[in-house]
Image (cartoon, helix red, strand yellow):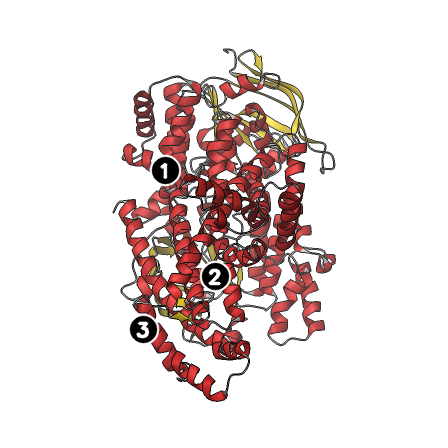
Amino acid sequence: MSTPLLSISDLSILLPDGADRRHAVAEVAMKLHAGETVCIVGESGSGKSLTARAIMGLLPAPHVRVGSGVIDFGGEDLTKVDYERLRNIRGSEISMIFQEPMTALNPVMTIGDQIDEIFRFHVSMPPEERQKRALGLLEDVNLPDPPRIMAAYPHELSGGQRQRSMIAMALALGPKILIADEPTTALDVTTQAQILQLIKDMQRRLGTGVLFITHDFGVVADIADRVIVMQEGLIVESGKSTQVLNKPKHKYTKSLIAAIPRLKPRKARKRSKEVVVETSALHKSFGGGRSFFGFGKNAHAIDAVSDVNIELRKGETLGVVGESGSGKSTLARCIIRLIDSDTGMVKLNGVDITSLKRNEMRQHRKFIQMVFQDPFASLNPRSKVGDIISQGPMLQGIEKTKAHQRARELLDVVGLDSKAFDRFPHEFSGGQRQRIGIARALALDPDILVADEPVSALDVSIQAQILGLLDQIRKEMDLSMLFITHDLRVAAQVCDFVAVMQKGHVVEVGATNKLFTQPQHEYTKSLLEAVPGKDWHFA
Amino acid sequence: MPRSSKIFRYVSKRLLQGIPIIIAIIVINFFLLNLAEGDAVDVLAGEAGSATPEYMEQLRKKFGLDQPLPVQLAVYLKNVLVLDLGYSFRHEMAVQDLIFDRFAATALLMTSTIILAVGFGILLGLMAAMRLNTWKDAVITVFALITYATPLFWVGLMMIVVFSLYLGWFPTSGMENVAAFYEGWDRVVDIAHHLVLPTITLSLFYLALYTRMMRASMLEQYGQDYVVTARAKGLTERRITFVHVLRNALLPVVTMAGVQVGALIGGSVIVESVFAWPGLGMLAFESLFARDLNLLLGIFLLSSILVVVVNLVVDIIYCFLDPRIDVE
């Protein structure tokens, strides 16, 4: 084999004194060849991002720094080169793209200016030439109307367009290596598929070596030539992607792969006749600014939910899937009346709740409860866990001692030690907090649970545990569940029925196994087509 | 629609919206001032010594103070529409002439104060952030802390003691040396000379505030993702600081400066008293004790217009600094 572009040996990165471990990463060794894609996979805190940053000399110095090891890039040791040389390499020979293209771009600078900087600081070229090159780059990454994009600010573009601009910027000088740090994690699944395809195409054309950081094995299956699996700062397994994915050796890799939800829809169960939640012609729009003094028509109103008719029957799980902005969260919030819908009906156990007054609504609240996406933001950081759980029942008139007793039982139900009762949310990990969130929702003995992306913020192994817990609770307590998700793998695993939303409309509803095998609507087909790693049938 | 014509529409809309705000301010001020015990006639009579009730009644009738309040308000509003702000019984001058005369002095003081406070605040904050945790940062931070905590009037008095009385570098009070009859450039230099101490006194507090804000804002922006991107692009630290970080860091400082112009008028009352600066602040202070309500109302009206206009100007500056602001 040819000499590698990049060869890392025995790299260790030190954490500041007082951190929970000495090394962020240790004994890391890897190679990257021209035209090759190497994926580093791992859960949060595995050190995958820091490894990538160390290559570029972008560690958050002085707290985190390289302890030992060699990063050999074409004969130079990147841990030893001086600042000027490193600055020259960045952006021209090695470049990088990031997870969140909104924050990774300067919000007050046009895309054109941000691309132009690369040329200005690395090569000497007349302005017209630079302009021409930038336009050409934007065309290469398939952006429509390049002159308009050049003059646009980041907030004027969609997430996918921003990431394409980032890629254009990164590939401006034809770098030998492209480091991609979770570049598609913040994007919708169809956009993700396009961006992955774009990276592949550009790589083929330029012969770039791509180092791709991700937590998603589906993405790995789609693009990787070789895979490196990291756990707590150590490489636990590496090898050809077919080998690692299909015949993992290390038990951590095996457990990670086992935790990925299968894209095989669950078996249909017998359907109850009893309808617990029903919406008819539900409509909600968010207005733009009102005109002068509130006169005149409400301009730029956006229909977040438009003519939605769904029904949830007793004991079943109805999935609502769709991309960001499709209105799925707004629908959930209308159903539990966190926000008021404009027109239409929401029937809860046969009662229309859209017209109820605030105090009338209170007695219905105990039937329907919600689990939120972000386990960090959805718990009050100043309240003890026990109080968070027992507050709901106490508001409904249950005695304090009884409510506390029940809270302790619920902590046990969701798999937490009852000592958690007197602790604060920040003492728990993400998965544990989501368990607290579930216990809080269960405290009122609801009939219906609305779960809004309950596992999207969690690592895959934790995600599997929480999904298992939800399923077990649903069975034991005979709950009906409305499950909002953007992840079709998750939907396939937990839902009996699935409603697909696009731009506020439900475009298709059907039993999960039918919808996954014979999608009717074009949009459903494109969603299924875009699921990463769909062709990978792991053991 | 191009952004410039959007901004034009936005400005005209905001100016229109300013009108009801200013009318509301006039009405509220009018009733607030009338809640206070006593009127101009009481004060005049008290100073004259031996005024009979009949004479006071006559004076009230002459000034229109015997009318019911709503009528007085209606008359005042009607007069404001034709830019007649009434007559100051105290100064025996039309209010508008009096306050426009004094307004120039206050505007001069305020403008120089804002320029000094915002300009140097940004500069010092920038320097402190760039030299984080060095002695320069420490000196700037301690300086900001001390000036932030020092009362305005005390600073003014100390300035006079040190720089006027002890060192004799600057005049103690006033806006110009009237006795010297300077003209042309000589007069400009003379006024500038008088301006130094009041400006420094009034701006120190704000200077400290903006220094601290700018430093914090710069440090916050240094932690943003786009700075990592800029480094990964191979830009120099200079470019990152002055082109990427600086513009983003300015945004909160500009907002704050806009909000504080109103507070500055309040602060100028103290400084104008200490330095005998013939501005609106001092006029307001005098007219309050003379129960010269017409004059006070006029000053309030002018200040409210000033605040509305300055806020608009800040918002327009903001539109150019931050393209994310929607000017619809």
Report the chain holding disc 1.
Answer: A
Report the chain holding disc 3.
Answer: B
Rendered view: A499 above or below B49: above
Left or right of A258, for residue A486: left
Residue A173: which quarter of the image?
A: top left
Instruction: Find the distance from the CA under tag 3 to the CA under tag 2.
Output: 71 Å
Residue B89: image x %, image y %? 43, 72
- State the residue at coordinates (50%, 76%): B44
Left or right of B297, for residue A414: right
Rendered view: A326 above or below A179: below
Q: Which amino acid does label 1 sit on?
A: Gln
Q: How many residues crowd mark 1 within 10 Å: few (<14), some (14–19), many (20+)?
A: many
Residue corresponding to mark 1: A161
| B152 or A474, nearer to the observer | B152
Q: How many residues crowd mark 2 within 10 Å: few (<14), some (14–19), many (20+)?
A: many
Residue corresponding to mark 3: B78
Regarding mark 1 in the picture, which secondary structure is present there? helix
Residue B289: image x %, image y %? 54, 70
Q: Residue furthest bottom?
A: B54
Instruction: Find the distance from the CA under tag 3 to the CA under tag 1.
Output: 57 Å
Q: How many labels were placed on the picture?
A: 3
User: Which tag, 2 or 1, sits closer to the chain's start?
Assistant: 1
Residue corresponding to mark 2: A316
Q: How many residues crowd mark 3 within 10 Å: few (<14), some (14–19), many (20+)?
A: few
Residue A421: image x %, image y %? 71, 60
| Closer to viewer: mark 3 or mark 1 | 3
